[in-house]
Image (cartoon, rainbow, N blue to C red):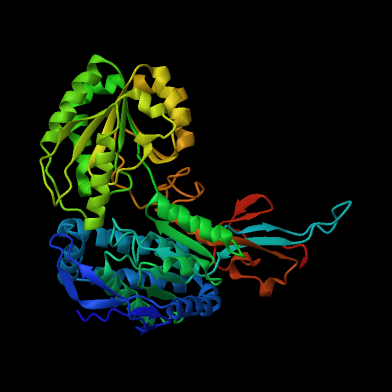
Amino acid sequence: MTLLGHNYIGGGRSGEGDVKLLSIAAATGEAHAVPFLTATEAEVSAAVDAASAAYPAYRALPAEARAKFLDAIAEEIDALGDDFIAEVSRETALPAGRLQGERSRTSNQMRLFAKVLRRGDFYGARIDTALPQRQPLPRPDLRQYRIGVGPVAVFGASNFPLAFSVAGGDTAAALAAGCPVVFKAHSGHLITSELVADAIERAVKKTGMPAGTFNMIYGDRVGAQLVKSAGIQAVGFTGSLRGGRALCDMAAARPQPIPVFAEMSSINPIILMPEALKLRGDAIAKDLAGSVTVGVGQLCTSPGLLLGVRSPELTSFIEKLSAAFGGTNPATMLNSGGLTHYNGGVARLTQLPGVKVIATGGTSYTQAVPHLFKADAALLFSKEAPLEEEVFGPSTVIVELESREQLLDFAAKMNGQLTATLQAEIGDLQGNQDLIAILEQKAGRLLLNGFPTGVEVSDAMVHGGPYPATSDARGTSVGTLAIDRFLRPICYQNYPDELLPAALQNSNPLGLLRLVDGEPTKAVVNDPRTA
């Protein structure tokens, strides 16, 4: 592997800056010898200009051409071998098996969006044919479909160095939509980012995509300039509430405000129903401890709050869960900053009146120690909402509520979440339809008898939710619906058929399912203008 440490701009490499970043091994703190040069203001502007210059040609490409490009990226990612996996593991302390699975998920995301492009439903084609005889006024011929919004800025996440990073879901969705990307590499994944960016650039050249279709810049403080750049038309972000909100505020304050699709904060509550605890308490306790500690708790869907109404079954369950946590072990986090934040969150909870530690998974000064807390129900209703502040790492809080009514009260005031989970039997569900109706308003994904860690990449998946889980509850950052964030509708009125985009032409050359005069059809359009 030959590393350069320079920014990717318009199909070339640029290293004008003198501010250097180093790749740090997560487990040992050892720095790699190759420095990575932070992008200068001029380089950030050049990257945005390159994406803006590529946009007209890239968005005008047939969907099949973009699909072949995404397939080529997938092939290049799959070809990244054991030396690549070893380097990613060095930077992140993630095990090889996890990274091999994440590599497959990353390439499969590209292939999934290629399928979306080939089936054509992303166009959302709608046709209202002319009604020249309508009284009192004739209706014009109206045809609508969707195009990419323009260059998209994407910020790499810390916890998924592949699947939510350089070639991750935001990049895949933006490229599928016809939007060039300017990617800001995460400082914890510098070498990983360069190797994946090289793979994308190889795919750009193999498929003849315009130079500037993909760009990548390094730097801890380049994000603000990137979001404020006039050429950027949307932003994809996965990270902290503080960081996401700052980007949203910057984007809203621009002369031309733009949308920021930020995934930010979620405690992913799990509600423990009495019949489920009675029948499956032992299994739930074991699996729940595993869900909280998997990936050292560094998953945005990690369950951070457990809720149950006081009962003998809940008391027994808490004892079993405590024992399960006692059998866990400390583990290395992605970077030292993450460990510092996690330890700070643990200390904050420990110091709260009404909160106590009831189990830990060992002791360590250099690794994250799993923690199980128990908190008084009154804290759920505090104005400061201390139990709804995410602690990013292997910890969770269990709360014993006084009554079902208290559970309903909290659910009604709870913040927006990525997920909400019910551990329940059929009788539990039948008696809690009002609770479920509230949870539908609060979460992007409702789970039954499972655990929120583990997000399938598919057509039906929603990885989003009301604020503060995300900045826009209408979208998702995982699954094929993610493409919608980077598309906008455009309507053609009384356009000659031969000048219309292929997706809207009378002959339906792409064979799309379209909404024609209110009816879904693949048929050729009978256009009264040409009758």
Q: Check the image and report above or below for 240 versus 283.
A: below
Q: Where is residue 188 shown, x and y percent of the image?
A: 27, 64
Q: Is residue 386 left or right of residue 1?
A: right
Residue drawn at x 69%, y 53% as measured from the top left: 517
Q: Where is residue 479 shown, x and y percent of the image?
A: 40, 53
Residue drawn at x 55%, y 65% as measured from the top left: 149
Q: Where is residue 330 shown, x and y percent of the image?
A: 13, 46
Q: Check the image and report above or below for 160 versus 405.
A: below
Q: Check the image and report above or below for 95 versus 396.
A: below
Q: Nearer the viewer, residue 416 or 36?
A: 36
Q: Is residue 398 left or right of residue 321?
A: right
Count of marks overlaid on the render: 0
Q: Quadrant of residue 303?
A: top left
Residue drawn at x 52%, y 67% as measured from the top left: 228
Q: Quadrant of the N terminus?
A: bottom left
Q: Where is residue 439 shown, x and y percent of the image?
A: 44, 32
Q: Is residue 414 left or right of residue 491?
A: left
Q: Nearer the viewer, residue 117 or 522?
A: 117
Q: Quadrant of residue 277?
A: top left
Q: Nearer the viewer, residue 330 or 56?
A: 330
Q: Check the image and report above or below for 353 versus 529.
A: above
Q: Is residue 527 left or right of residue 35?
A: right
Q: Quadrant of the C terminus?
A: bottom right
Can see residue 505? yes
Can see residue 484? no
